[in-house]
Amino acid sequence: MDSHTPPPPSSHPGTLHFIPPDLSAFEPSKPLARSLDINTLLWIGGLFDTYLSVSYPLRLAHALGPTWSLMTASLSSAGHSWGTSSIARDAEEIGKIVTMIKQMRPGGKVVIMGHSTGCQDCMEYVAGKGNEDRPLVEGVILQAPVSDREAIEADVPAAMISEANQLALRMCREGHDKDVMPNRLTKVIFGRVAITARRWVDIASPAPAHDGADDFFSSDLSDERLAASFGKFPASTALLILEGGSDESVPETIDKHALVARWTAATLIGGGVTDNTNGGVVEGASHNLNGNPQAVVQDLIRRVVGFVARMDSEELQHTSGGARI
């Protein structure tokens, strides 16, 4: 879940890539090598995000080497439209942007980097229904993966959550899943955003099943649930996990280091590859790093640059002896 603190007004040169009928990706200008083997890091924002509403991707774009370029995706769920969308639709749209990138740069690698709900999008892309039909990506970065359910439970009165959950579940059962929830039940945390009953169930993931589509990162998920998500990462898609040490969307009672360790273990048990050299908890990092000290932002950037460098040197690959980490 995203902080609403915006960066200051600014202008930035770059290329806007249009993918008909309504998708686009912005690529900040930077010197690149003259090659068809340019690699691309596709950054995917979270709830409420629009182009450059999170500021660190601009610094990251210029920190990447001359064979790596960064694009930020604009999906149909961007801004205030997420309440009527789904991560399944997001994953489908990400696939269309990745296809465009691979056609434009046929010799290059593609890494998708999610921020906040963008992390759920990345998980859905790799492990969700229909993943076998989506173009493969060589890497996934999860920055600020958080549980919407646990964040809501920490900020909203239990009675209000229960009322909203029961109403949303009933609306879905009665075939009104695309109808909007009453704002009086959702405005405490989401303001004036319209949220369908299905989207509320996806995000709030009501008990007892906790099977909302977005519920990948809750601390109480079983090992079996993690095996069905993190355990589905193929050996050809390296994973980097970056949890914010001061992420305001994660309840203080949750052990972030232990949670990252569980996600990493599930990935490795399933045959995937993780970068434990650069991954882990970024100490001092808030949810989106807007306004964080430069040293904290630079730490995050260093980790991402280190990850793609290890990909370039083929350090992150699966061998007969197991996953290299």
Image (cartoon, rainbow, N blue to C red):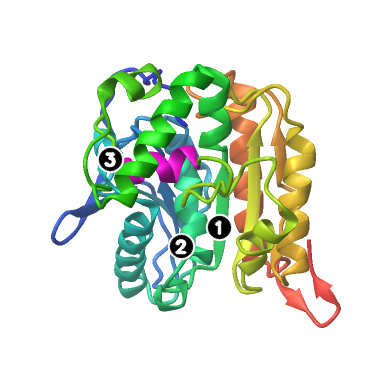
Q: Which residue is mark 3?
A: 196
Q: Earlier in the sequence, mark 1 or mark 2?
A: 2
Q: Is residue 201 above or below residue 270?
A: above
Label 2 belongs to which residue?
Answer: 125
Residue 232: where, in percent of width, then height? 62, 68
Residues at discs 1 and 2 in contact (Cβ within 8 Å): yes
**Residue 29 visible within the image:** no
Determine the residue positioned at 46% across, 77% down.
Answer: 132
Q: Is residue 203 magenta?
A: yes
Q: How far across and down, in percent of the image, does residue 52 sit? A: 34, 34
Q: x%, y% of residue 218?
A: 62, 41
Q: Amino acid at mark 1?
A: Val
Quarter of the C terminus within the rendering: bottom right
Q: Nearer the viewer, residue 2 or 23?
A: 2
Q: Amino acid at mark 3?
A: Thr
Give whichever of discs 3 and 2 has the lower sequence position.
2
Q: What is the number of the mark on residue 140? A: 1
Type of amino acid under label 2 = Tyr
Please identify the quarter of the rendering in which residue 42 is found.
bottom left
Q: Is 154 rendered above or below residue 19?
A: above
- Residue nearest the observer in this picture, 260 or 285: 260
Extreme-right residue of the structure: 321
At horizontal 30% and vertical 66% (from top left) the residue drawn is 96
